[in-house]
């Protein structure tokens, strides 16, 4: 297991009402194995023009900084490349930048966005910013040595405009946002979930009709957390024992999916299977089980398919988060382990054909492998380290 801290990045946006494209853009670039750059750009206005301007700004800034180009040169290049609004004479795009290292060092640069804030030990505060001038633009900057579970919040001005003229007289001010996120923060909540919670609250203040593109981008400094998931018995029954023993040697959380798989694990470990009944569960997901020494035992295909749907949504608007995050059915518990908690995931996939499924193509062997491959691909898009072992 990697002893270095894990740099977890997550963001969420809602578009200006009536617009198909968001005028904000977030771009994340891995510099090397121990460093990342995240840029949040807010294009002038809304719609197509704002989307193009913010996308170019975020892309150019992040790629140049990842290439060790000095910030001054980055800003000069962007200013000389992108236009200034002739009508209003204001900047093409505002931006916030976070440069992060896995030893906890974070450098923040902010140009005309709400000032990024930090949550440390459950308390929100503004770091000590200094100001420098580059090409006539005043840019706030700071360096911060983050501890485990510290979070950095970057935002477009749609957040502080939320509710203006609707629920609130003057919008949602930064101190109020910081106080709200203090109340919502928990050390185990992911960067993506924190960004989702903040943007969802802004959308509520806008009465679900945002008067501005609204984006939150969050950096969370955390430890690596491993999870191993076993699904299906080995294609050769003689390999079942080796598969289970290799699976149990993995660090972190151990998850078993599927009734047949649970029977194989039970036989090898000589531990009984206990069915767990959840009162009031209306999720439609089959019940979970318990095996001593295993952290989570779920049903197979139905549960995994529901988790795949949650994962697809996670990459988009993440609306189902507010459903599964508060449930305790098998799919919700598995989604919490894979989407929220785990950073390093190993799938142990048994390639035996289940006799019960041979006549049903919709639940067949090929579908199982395709589902695992698709889920693994989405988890990789979440910046998780994913390995798949076949038996």
Image (cartoon, rainbow, N blue to C red):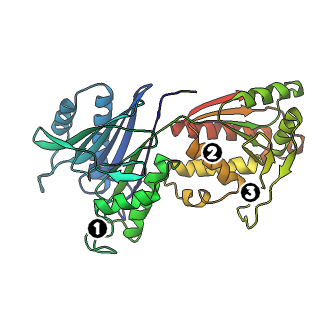
Residue 220 rendering spot, x and y as whole percentages: 44, 42
Q: Earlier in the sequence, mark 3 or mark 1?
A: 1
Marks 1 and 2, Cα distance to the nearest angstrom? 36 Å
Marks 3 and 1, Cα distance to the nearest angstrom? 41 Å
Name the element at disc 3.
Answer: loop
Query: Can residue 365 be seen here?
Result: yes
Q: Is residue 103 left or right of residue 290?
A: left
Q: Earlier in the sequence, mark 1 or mark 2?
A: 1
Residue at 72% from the left image edge and 65% from the top image edge: 282
For the C terminus, the image quarter is top right
Q: Quadrant of residue 82?
A: top left
Marks 3 and 2, Cα distance to the nearest angstrom? 16 Å
- Residue at the disc numbered 2: 337
Name the element at disc 2.
Answer: helix
Q: Is residue 27 left or right of residue 286?
A: left
- Residue at the disc numbered 3: 285
Mark 1 neighbour density, 10 Å: few (under 14) some (14–19) many (20 or more): many
Mark 3 neighbour density, 10 Å: few (under 14) some (14–19) many (20 or more): some
Name the element at disc 1.
Answer: loop
């Amino acid at each position: 297991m990697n002893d270095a801290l894990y740099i977890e990045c997550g963001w969420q946006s809602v578009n200006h009402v009536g617009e198909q494209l968001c005028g904000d853009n977030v771009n994340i670039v891995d510099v090397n194995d121990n460093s990342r750059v995240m840029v949040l750009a807010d294009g002038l206005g809304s719609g197509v023009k704002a989307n193009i301007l913010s996308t170019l700004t975020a892309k150019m800034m992040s790629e140049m900084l990842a290439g060790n180009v000095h910030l001054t040169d980055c800003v000069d290049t962007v200013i000389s490349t992108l236009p200034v609004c002739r009508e209003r004479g204001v900047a093409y795009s505002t931006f916030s930048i976070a440069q992060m290292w896995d030893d906890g060092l974070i450098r923040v640069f902010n140009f005309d966005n709400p000032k990024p804030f930090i949550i440390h030990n459950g308390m929100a505060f503004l770091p000590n910013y200094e100001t420098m001038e580059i090409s006539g633009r005043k840019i706030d900057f700071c360096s911060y040595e983050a501890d485990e579970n510290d979070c950095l919040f970057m935002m477009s001005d749609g957040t502080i405009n939320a509710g203006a003229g609707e629920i609130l007289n003057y919008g949602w001010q930064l101190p109020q946002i910081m106080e709200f996120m203090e109340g919502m923060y928990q050390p185990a909540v992911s960067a993506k979930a924190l960004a989702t919670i903040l943007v969802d609250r802004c959308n509520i203040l806008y009465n679900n009709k945002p008067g501005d593109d609204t984006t939150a981008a969050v950096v969370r400094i955390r430890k690596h957390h491993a999870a191993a998931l076993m699904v299906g018995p080995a294609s050769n029954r003689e390999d079942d024992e080796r598969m289970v023993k290799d699976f149990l040697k993995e660090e972190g959380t151990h998850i078993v999916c599927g009734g047949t798989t649970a029977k194989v694990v039970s036989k090898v470990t000589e531990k009984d299977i206990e069915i767990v009944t959840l009162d009031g569960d209306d999720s439609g997901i089959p019940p979970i089980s318990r095996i001593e020494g295993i952290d989570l035992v779920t049903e197979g295909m139905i549960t995994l398919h529901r988790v795949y749907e949650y994962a697809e949504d996670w990459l988009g608007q993440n609306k189902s988060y507010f459903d599964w995050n508060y449930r305790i059915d098998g799919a919700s518990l598995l989604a919490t382990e894979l989407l929220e908690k785990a950073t390093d995931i190993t799938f142990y996939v048994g390639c035996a054909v289940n006799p019960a499924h041979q006549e049903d193509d919709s639940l067949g062997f090929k579908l199982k492998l395709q589902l695992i491959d698709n889920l693994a691909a989405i988890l990789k898009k979440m910046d998780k380290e994913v390995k798949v072992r076949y038996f």
